[in-house]
């Protein structure tokens, strides 16, 4: 077991290095670099200035030298300096990360909990109004573009009904008391979390409803009933654990995206998260930041996969080994 | 209480009166089980035999009020366990009958156990459902149960999962689970169909041993006359939701009356040779099971019956020949058969 995890971690490291190399070449293939972007912003400049700037950023060196240097840095935990912010990339990402994680993790947890609850309930009463509602709602959530829902939510709950702030993560000026400050942040996060959670939730209710319907027809459910177990016990113990296997798969996939998966929501609600940072860095050709964010995303994905496998193994004894 | 119209045989542990089950299919109500009557005595084995879809499994599920609903429902009938009216029990009370007084084992030992819980967990859960004992003693009891169904090294098996066991082993576990409270009635729904022949024999031996020890009454549901002759004292033959014939094993085997029963026995796999030494063709019942959605008037077996006459266009009543011998066929009306 432990050995399997270590093996996975080792493989993961190799994989991350591979991802870095790929990303590096991908960015080289994109037209323009940070100097082009800077000069374009500044309204132009002469080639001599461009050459000097490139030299100062080390961009005049051959690509393979740049790559080797970068890999060397990453191996000792240094993600380099942002061209644009002139700050260490790690610091930059870490300052944007809390917002993103608060948003994505709370949306994910809400979605898994309520989505599964809705789906299971709909499966137990497959002919009821609620079951039909879940089906329609799931289709809606599945088909709705996140930015559209975000804007509608903004219009309704921030503009027409001014219950929640429309943008940002903090009020200006900030409240003095730390507790009030926390409340203020939560207040700001309600709408974006709701938007993201609704879309996630649709998936979970759809999948858990289908999976629960499937499991409820299984022979072992009939066995559990003939043993004289009460209906709640049949559902909560015998059906739910089997039915939640697909939910775990989906949650694992989405857990992999918590790092940078909320670009659109963060943009709509102007949250200072990792998403907008990545987007702006791409526009500015700020390679170290882009590489840093992608590195973080790759690492999260691999960690999420390992966690998913462990949960899966814990839930289903038929899965022998996680390798 | 028992209605006055219901005759009640005090020797019976289980009495089933006019049991009917309907299924709702696309707004149309179809009759899966039609007024089935039978009784079960203490320590007796009754075999219910019939082809797929004849209602034999539905009878078993109905006894525990487990007809899948929707779409099905018990539309009529009475079920008495001793003097307890099963139909009038509350949900809580029926859960106390299930697994305690009436237990059930199923055809598919491969899928009848929950794959994500250990054998011990599923046994202990059943024990604790019916007895107020702590987990440790329940565990000991579970090991004893496994030993009683002849599972080798039960201490080791108890922590294993269903996927680690063979089909025969799983069926033994199912039996162990059914025996937790020494039920008065054990319903075995095709318990050996999915198992190979040697394992079948072992399972039957085990069931007989348990029956002798605990005086358990067994209802054996099967489509295999071989299994019935192995186990049963009495046989009920079902066709298209009707009980069409009932009698002791000898009566059914040696002097079947209903043409369907005759056909069923005739189509048993035996290698017969004719006088010239050629193998005879295996007889079959021609035609197929009627479509329950479009029932014809008259005898359900009529369209396939070689002895059918015009009076078979009317539904035959069940002729009671006394001593739990009955036939649903016009042939016995005038003593002809």
Image (tube, coloured by chain):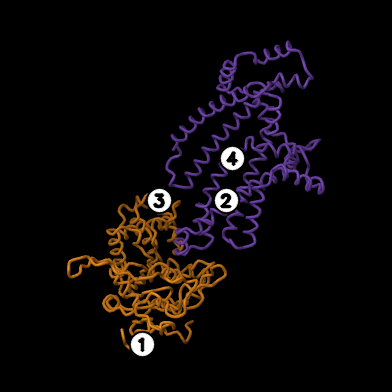
Chain colours: A purple, B orange
Q: How far is disc 2 from disc 3 in space, using C-alphas?
A: 26 Å
- Find out whether the residues at labels 1 and 2 contact each other: C-beta distance under 8 Å: no
Q: Earlier in the sequence, mark 4 or mark 2?
A: 2
Q: Do tags 4 and 2 sit on the same chain? A: yes
Q: How far is disc 4 from disc 2 in space, using C-alphas?
A: 16 Å
Of A63 and B276, which appears nearest the observer?
B276
Q: How far is disc 4 from disc 3 in space, using C-alphas?
A: 30 Å
Element on which disc 1 rests: loop
**The label number, if any, that marks residue B161 in the structure image:** 3
Label 4: which residue? Answer: A255
Label 1: which residue? Answer: B333
Chain of the residue under the numbered disc 1 shown in the image: B
Element on which disc 4 rests: helix
Give the x, y percent position of residue B270: 25, 66
Element on which disc 2 rests: helix
- Frontmost of labels 4 and 3 is 4
Chain of the residue under the numbered disc 4 shown in the image: A
Give the x, y percent position of residue A168: 76, 37
Query: Is residue B101 visible to us here?
Result: no
Chain of the residue under the numbered disc 2 shown in the image: A
**The label number, if any, that marks residue A207 in the structure image:** 2
């Amino acid at each position: 077991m432990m050995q399997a995890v270590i093996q996975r971690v080792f493989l993961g490291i190799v994989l991350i290095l591979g991802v870095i190399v790929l990303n590096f070449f991908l960015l080289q293939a994109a037209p323009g670099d940070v100097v082009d972007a800077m000069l374009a912003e500044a309204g132009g400049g002469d080639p001599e200035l461009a050459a000097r700037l490139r030299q100062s950023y080390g961009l005049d060196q051959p690509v393979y030298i740049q790559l080797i240097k970068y890999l060397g840095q990453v191996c000792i935990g240094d993600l380099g300096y942002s061209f644009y912010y002139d700050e260490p990339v790690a610091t930059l990402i870490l300052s944007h990360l809390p917002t993103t994680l608060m948003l994505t993790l709370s949306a994910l947890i809400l979605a898994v909990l309520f989505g599964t609850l809705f789906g299971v309930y709909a499966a137990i009463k497959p002919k009821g109004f609620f079951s039909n509602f879940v089906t329609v709602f799931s289709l809606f959530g599945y088909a709705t573009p996140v930015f559209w829902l975000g804007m509608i939510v903004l219009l309704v709950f921030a503009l027409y009904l001014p219950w929640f702030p429309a943008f940002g993560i903090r009020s200006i000026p900030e409240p003095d008391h730390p507790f009030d400050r926390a409340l203020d942040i939560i207040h700001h996060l309600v709408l974006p979390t709701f938007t993201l959670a609704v879309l996630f939730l649709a998936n979970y209710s759809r999948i858990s409803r289908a999976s629960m319907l499937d499991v409820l027809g299984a022979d072992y459910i009939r066995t559990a009933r003939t043993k004289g177990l009460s209906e709640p016990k049949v559902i909560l113990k015998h059906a739910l654990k089997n039915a939640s296997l697909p939910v775990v798969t989906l949650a694992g996939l989405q857990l992999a995206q918590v790092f940078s998966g909320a670009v659109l929501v963060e943009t709509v609600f102007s949250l200072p998260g990792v998403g907008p940072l990545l987007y702006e860095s791409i526009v500015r050709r700020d390679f170290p930041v882009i590489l840093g964010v992608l590195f973080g995303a790759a690492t999260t994905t691999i960690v999420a996969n390992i966690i998913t496998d462990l949960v899966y193994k814990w839930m289903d004894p038929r899965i022998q080994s996680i390798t | 209480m028992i209605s006055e119209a219901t005759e009640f045989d005090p020797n019976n542990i289980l009495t089933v009166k006019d049991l009917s089950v309907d299924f709702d299919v696309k707004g149309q109500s179809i009759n899966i089980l039609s007024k089935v009557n039978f009784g079960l005595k203490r320590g007796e084995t009754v075999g219910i035999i019939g082809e797929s879809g004849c209602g034999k499994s539905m009878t078993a599920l109905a006894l525990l009020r487990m007809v899948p609903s929707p779409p099905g429902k018990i539309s009529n009938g009475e079920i008495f366990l001793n003097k307890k009216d099963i139909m009038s029990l509350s949900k809580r009370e029926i859960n106390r009958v299930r697994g305690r007084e009436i237990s059930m084992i199923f055809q598919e030992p491969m899928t009848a156990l929950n794959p994500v819980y250990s054998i011990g967990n599923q046994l202990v859960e059943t024990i604790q459902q019916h007895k107020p004992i702590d987990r440790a003693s329940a565990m000991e009891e579970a090991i004893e149960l496994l030993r009683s169904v002849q599972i080798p090294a039960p201490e080791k098996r108890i922590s294993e999962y269903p996927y680690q066991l063979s089909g025969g082993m799983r069926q033994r576990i199912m039996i162990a689970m059914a025996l937790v409270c020494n039920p008065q009635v054990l319903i075995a729904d095709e318990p050996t169909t999915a198992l190979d022949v040697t394992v079948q024999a072992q399972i039957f031996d085990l069931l007989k041993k348990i029956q002798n020890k605990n005086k358990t009454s067994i209802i054996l549901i099967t489509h295999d006359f071989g299994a019935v002759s192995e186990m049963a004292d009495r046989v009920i033959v079902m066709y298209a939701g009707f009980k069409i014939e009932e009698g002791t094993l000898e009566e059914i085997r040696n002097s079947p009356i209903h043409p369907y029963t005759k056909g069923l026995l005739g189509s048993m796999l035996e290698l017969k040779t004719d006088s010239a030494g050629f193998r005879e063709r295996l007889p079959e019942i021609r035609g197929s099971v009627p479509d329950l959605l479009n029932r014809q008037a008259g005898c359900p077996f009529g369209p396939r019956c070689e002895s059918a006459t015009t009076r078979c266009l009317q539904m035959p009543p069940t002729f009671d020949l006394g001593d739990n011998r009955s036939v649903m066929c016009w042939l016995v009306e005038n003593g002809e058969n």
